[in-house]
Image: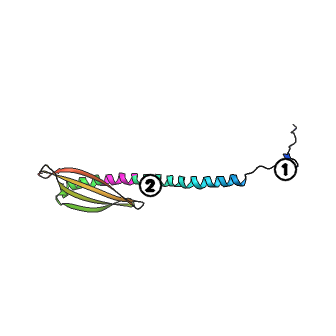
Amino acid sequence: MRFSPTTSLHCAGKHLSSGFTLAEVLAALVFMAIVIPVAIEGVRLASLAGQVAERKSAAVRISELVLNQIILNRQWQQPTQMGTIREGQHDYRWTMQLEAWPESSLRLVTVRVGYTVQGQEYEVSLSSLVDITQ
């Protein structure tokens, strides 16, 4: 098997080489300087959204648990309560508030659960009516 001889490109006696010009390299660097920070910020926001969603889900579970315990144990008779529950590595602060309701035999019990994600405060609340005559 025979191969044809390789030829190199010459133009008027000068050897042509392929490569990038300084302008192309600078344009690529400018493009990367714009795109990379935007991409990193997008990843950071996605991470924050995931953390908030995960912690909010846990806060809702905790508020349901606390509200059910307060109602079942009739602890709602105290006007205000508060505490902290630790789930995993995170602390959730809760408060219970008792409010009057237009119907005199009912009271509105509200449990608020607060949590912090990346230095920012968030809160969920859950309410239920209780019959004070029982």
Identified at 43% across, 52% down, the residue is 49
SS category of the residue bearing label 2: helix
SS category of the residue bearing label 1: strand
Q: What residue type is labelled 1?
A: His
Q: Which residue lies furthest to the top in this view?
A: 1
In the drawing, does residue 89 fall left or right of residue 27? left
Q: From the top left corner, tell me how far across and down residue 111 is, in percent.
A: 26, 55
**Residue 74 position by quadrant:** bottom left
Tally the numbered discs.
2
> Badge 2 local density, few (<14 within 10 Å), some, or many (20+)?
some
In the drawing, does residue 14 fall left or right of residue 97? right
The question of residue 60 being in magenta is answered with yes
Disc 2 and disc 1: Cα gap in Å? 55 Å
Q: Which sits in the foreground, 21 or 99?
A: 21
Earlier residue among tags 2 and 1: 1
Give residue 48's mark.
2
Q: In this picture, which residue range is highlighted in magenta?
A: 53-62
In the drawing, does residue 50 fall left or right of residue 24? left
For the N terminus, the image quarter is top right
Q: What residue type is labelled 2?
A: Leu
Identified at 24% across, 51% down, the residue is 127
Residue identified by numbered label 1: 15
Residue 128, above or below 88: above
Q: Which sits in the foreground, 2 or 19?
A: 19
| Helix, strand or loop: magenta stretch | helix
Q: From the top left corner, tell me how far across and down residue 120 is, in percent.
A: 39, 60
In the drawing, does residue 36 fall left or right of residue 10? left
Identified at 13% across, 53% down, the residue is 132
